[in-house]
Amino acid sequence: MQRFKKASRGSAATTAALLALAVPTFGQLVAEPTFVLIDTAIVGHLGESALAGLALGSTVILTAVGLCIFLAYATTSQVARHFGAGRMREGLQAGIDGLWLALAIGVVLAAGLFVLAEPLCWLLGGRGEDLAQAVAYTRPVVLGAPGMLLVYAANGLYRGLQKVTVTLVVAVAGAVLNTVLDVLFVIVLGWGVAGSGIATFAAQWFMGIVLAAGALRAARAAGVSWRPRPAGMTAAGRDGLPLFVRTLALRAGLVGTVMAAAALGTSVLAGYQVVNASWNFMVNVLDSVAIAGQTLVGAELGAARWEGARRLTRITLRTGALVGIAAGLVFAVLGLVAPALFSPDASVQQMATIGMVITGVALPLQSWMWAADGILIGAGDFRYLARTCAAVSAIYLAVLVALVFGVAPLLPDAALRCALLWLAFDFVLMGGRALTNGLRIRTDTWMGAR
């Protein structure tokens, strides 16, 4: 009985530690999507072409920068393991190497996107005034790419050190700054959609500089050099490459879903946009638990506390599933009422409701999958994630081809086509990743991945 009470107290304390990291992480994750929504609201008052330009330009920069999320995940994993092992100087050095790598990639990315802004926006479908507005937004905003990547790398460092409150404060400050500058540049000074790009550029550099400055101060206090180390940057890039492949495979699956929705009909595509925008916000809730688990499990593995890592894994997975149940219930219920807020069209509302209800049912499984994903990232099991995510995405894309060209033509009802699309997304792509992550977690191999 005494042992049971002690175990219960330990489990409660671990869950509390997990939530103490997850809640600020959630705030930091949703800050950027929130000010993107504010940007959209402000630019939307300039007319359809300005809003279309913002959509195209933001797709270019968010896709390019999103593929570099490995800078956050790889740095978190490295720093957390050093932190757990009591090697603070090595952890800070890994963080500094990550910052230099982020800056180098960001400069190259900014230069390339600035030069290729017009052809990239044209490839996305921009023509005439829409294209002109897209280029006007894209060219200033891509100059903030180095700042955005510094934010990713610095967030990884702070998460690894379990100091996530500072990232939340800076994210909120950046969102406020972006909003104020948006109003000033777009509305007061009349700079149009380019003003929105300049505002975002300034906010991203502000966040990157503030977070990097804090990391540099901590490094100096610990006697860690600020100088770039080519060997350290190379090691950081080598660790991050499999995570890049993982993210690229996931993005391929998401892009394939958009293309399939477009092929299944306008109402299906419009409904997809409603569900996808809502799902992207909800994923931040799920990902906050995954990142917290990634940080804590990485620290346990760094300290060679294997039983502690197993216990944290069980608690993280259980917490992820419970959060997913709550999120799924909310998502499904909103699916019955919220689509009317996005479109007055009855067919679009029907497609959105179908997608949100099906995805709501699947969110507990997705949340469990993201939690397992975070644990494997914390363990540094990057190559396994890259291989399995690529394989699952390839299978999913094949299923989409069969759905669009084989099954859909036999179904006269758009509602059935929409339902099959979301069933494939939730249970082939996301369910497949849950299966592969679960098979790995069942073994002890992942704990010795590094």
Image (cartoon, rainbow, N blue to C red):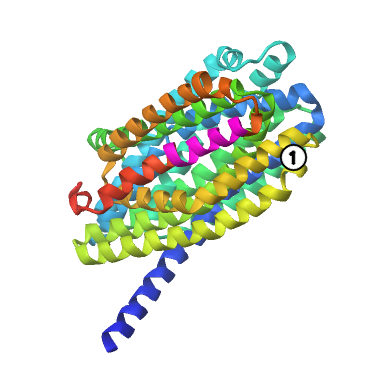
x then y, percent, for residue 161:
36, 58
- Residue under numbered circle 1: 342
Farthest bottom residue in view: 2
Residue 216 can be seen, yes or no:
no
Q: Is residue 117 above or below residue 183?
A: above
Residue at x-position 56% and y-position 27%:
258
Number of other residues with Cα within 10 Å of mark 1, as a class: few under 14, some 14 to 19, many 20 or more: some
Magenta-tinted stretch: 416-428
Residue at x-position 47% and y-position 43%:
151
Q: What residue type is disc 1 on? A: Phe
Instruction: Tell whether position 321 is magenta.
Output: no
Of 209 and 447, the residue lying toward us: 447
Is 173 displayed left or right of 70 in the figure?
right
Is 47 displayed left or right of 106 in the figure?
right
Quadrant of res 5: bottom left
Q: Is residue 380 above or below residue 67?
A: below
Give the main secondary structure, helix, strand or loop, of the magenta stretch.
helix
Of 100 and 120, the residue lying toward us: 120
Residue 300 can be seen, yes or no:
yes
Image quadrant where one finds the N terminus: bottom left
Instruction: Tell whether position 423 is magenta.
Output: yes
x then y, percent, for residue 296:
34, 60
x then y, percent, for residue 350:
70, 38
Q: Is residue 442 above or below residue 99?
A: below
Of 359 and 159, the residue lying toward us: 359
x then y, percent, for residue 42:
76, 37
Is 432 displayed left or right of 57 in the figure?
left
Q: What secondary structure is found at the residue carrying circle 1?
A: helix
